[in-house]
Every structure is written in structure tokens, then in C-alpha cells.
Image (spheres, rainbow, N blue to C red):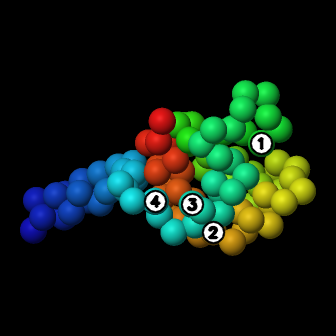
Amino acid sequence: MKALCVATAVTMAMAWSTPLLAASEPPPGVASCSGCHSSNAAAGSPVTRLYGRDANEIVTAMTGFRDGSIPATVMNRIAKGFSDDEVRAIAAWLAAQK
């Protein structure tokens, strides 16, 4: 029984620490991003390119927009429309794009 409890705890810890892998198909919601953050955004544009950007950076930014720690005009409202899982899925997919 003790071995089963340890194995279950290890499996659960691995599941929580395993990063979300990017899907080959865009997840729902990514179209909301690509309207402004296009794949061919020019360097120096006030709207940053998200394609190929680190997923953790995207998640951190979305969290900041959602909780108000990053000032925004539109992104705060957009970020509040996504769950944590949706944000992670979108971030993982965008990061995998080059």
C-alpha cells in the first residue's frame, strides 16, 4: 500500500510539473491574438510578435494583464476572457510557431 501511495504521489507531481505541449492545431482562442499580434509583426511595432516567443513570458504577461499589475488599454479585458488552461495552451502553441 505504501508503494502505491508513493507511486501515485510521484505520478501526480510529474503531471503538475510537466509543461503543456503545444498542439499542432491552434487551440481555441488563438485567433483573438493573431488579429493584432500577427506572425509578420514588424520589429519595433508597439504590438509585439507572439509567434516563437517564450510560453512563460506570454503566460506571465496574460496574468499581469488579468490581475492589473501590467497596465493595458485592451489586453486587460481580453485576458480576463481566458482560463488559466486556455492561456497555457495558447502560449504553448504560439511559442512553438517560428
Query: At 84% across and 60% down in the image, what residue appears?
Result: 74
69 sits left or right of 98 in the view: right
60 sits left or right of 5 in the view: right
Q: Does dot 2 land on a helix, a strand or a loop?
A: loop
Q: How many C-alpha atoms fall within 10 Å of the one at disc 4: few (<14), some, or many (≥20)?
A: some
Residue 65 or residue 32, whichever sits in front: 32
- Residue 9 circle label: none
One can see residue 8 in this view: yes
In this rendering, the label closer to the viewer, 3 or 2: 3
Q: CA distance from mark 4 to mark 1?
A: 20 Å
Mark 4 or mark 1: which comes first in sequence? 4
Residue 67 or residue 35, whichever sits in front: 35
Mark 3 or mark 1: which comes first in sequence? 3
Query: At 51% across and 69% down in the image, what residue appears?
Result: 28
Circle 3 residue: 30
- Label 2 sits on what residue type? Phe
Circle 4 residue: 26
Q: Are marks 2 and 1 in contact (CB under 8 Å)?
A: no
Q: Quadrant of residue 23?
A: bottom left
- Label 3 sits on what residue type? Val
